[in-house]
Amino acid sequence: MRTAFTEAFGVEHPVVQGGMQWVGTAPLAGAVSAAGGLGLVTALTQPTPEALVREIGRTRDLTDKPFGVNLTILPTIKPVPYDEYRHAIVDAGVTIVETAGANPAPHMDFFREHGVRVIHKCTSVRHAVKAQSVGVDAISIDGFECAGHPGEDDVPGLILIAAARRHVSIPMVASGGFADGRGLVAALALGADGINMGTRFMCTAEAPIHHSVKERIVASDERDTELIFRPLRNTSRVSSNAVSRETVELLAAGKAFEDVRHLVDGQRGRSVYESGDVEAGVWSVGQVQGLIHDIPTAGELVERIMAEAHELITGRLATMLEPVGA
Ligand code: NAD
């Protein structure tokens, strides 16, 4: 399948692996890129810029195909030396970066000077338009269904993708709610040039998280998420468990971030992925978990999605256009 995205980024399939905190490490990013998609190493998952350089090297050991690095800029408990991470990305020879969370403008001159192409992930049409105007190379438009931070507008992909396409002329992938070939075809029909998937790739053999977390995703349905941080305007969609529900209740009762910090700390969320105790902290997951029923390898998943999309386009959809009685 050729799209504006595959052409622009030199990948075989229009499938991007979302930049997930604690999940986007070399084994997963390398496997997705080796399978012909675009894998992303998540910068802030690495404790230091030096560790990021090493993780990029480990990814390169797994594939000689294109991969990128996700750099998310959102409120954090500890300040992040973004400049140093930016330099690490460039020093390690990475040429594709996904920015997310804030206006990419402050990073564009540096990335441009070093030949890096930028995909900006955002959750509204106005932010996509802004990113396009400051020179990013592609948009990843992220609907309300998504895991992690959906923004504050609550516009689901069915509307957001088509609305963004009216104003975005550069390649655009659709993010939030994608898990299979049906989703890919739907995204293409709405005007996107590919899809970005996070939760679906969490449920693959190579994702560096405990098997129990993958099993929880398979067992959950589309209703099993909570939106935390709503009153703080830093909304984040996470798995529904006792910790996330307590966080929602405390903030709804007027408590401040400091009062829930011990519940939501990313290090505590990380322990979920390491121990497999899905009640140990908050961890991001999308509504799309309701469409996830197995734990294939990343390569099997990408192949299956492409086969499903092909079958849907040339089979079920094409049949609808055949004359009656044909
Ligand atoms: P962290 O431990 O610093 O913070 C945990 C959570 O609290 C994060 O969601 C963060 O945005 C939020 N937070 C921190 N300080 C806050 C404040 N003063 N007010 C409101 N909210 C606050 O973060 P981490 O888990 O180490 O993650 C590192 C980065 O990755 C953060 O920027 C985080 O938002 C981001 N992240 C993104 C996604 C996603 O949507 N793809 C998922 C998880 C984490």
Image: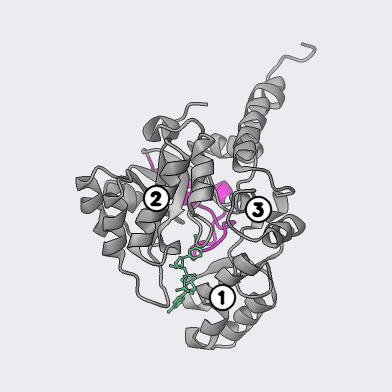
Q: Nearer the viewer, mark 1 or mark 2?
A: 2
Whether residue 229 is visible here, answered yes or no, is no
Q: Is residue 77 above or below residue 6?
A: below
Q: Quadrant of residue 225?
A: bottom right
Q: Quadrant of residue 66?
A: top left
The percent coordinates of residue 27 (x first, y second) are: 52, 49
Tell me where the magenta segment starts and ends, as one range.
Answer: 140-168
Element type at mark 2:
helix
View extreme (right): residue: 325
- Residue name at image x 65 percent, y 29 percent: 307
- Residue name at image x 46 percent, y 38 percent: 63
Q: Few, some or many C-alpha atoms within 10 Å of disc 2 (few <14, some 14-19, many ≥20)? A: many
Q: CA distance from mark 1 to mark 2?
A: 25 Å
Q: Closer to the camera, 287 or 67?
A: 67
Q: Earlier in the sequence, mark 1 or mark 3?
A: 1
Q: Which residue is mark 3?
A: 288
Q: Closer to the camera, 61 or 85?
A: 61
Q: Which residue is mark 1?
A: 268
Element type at mark 3:
helix
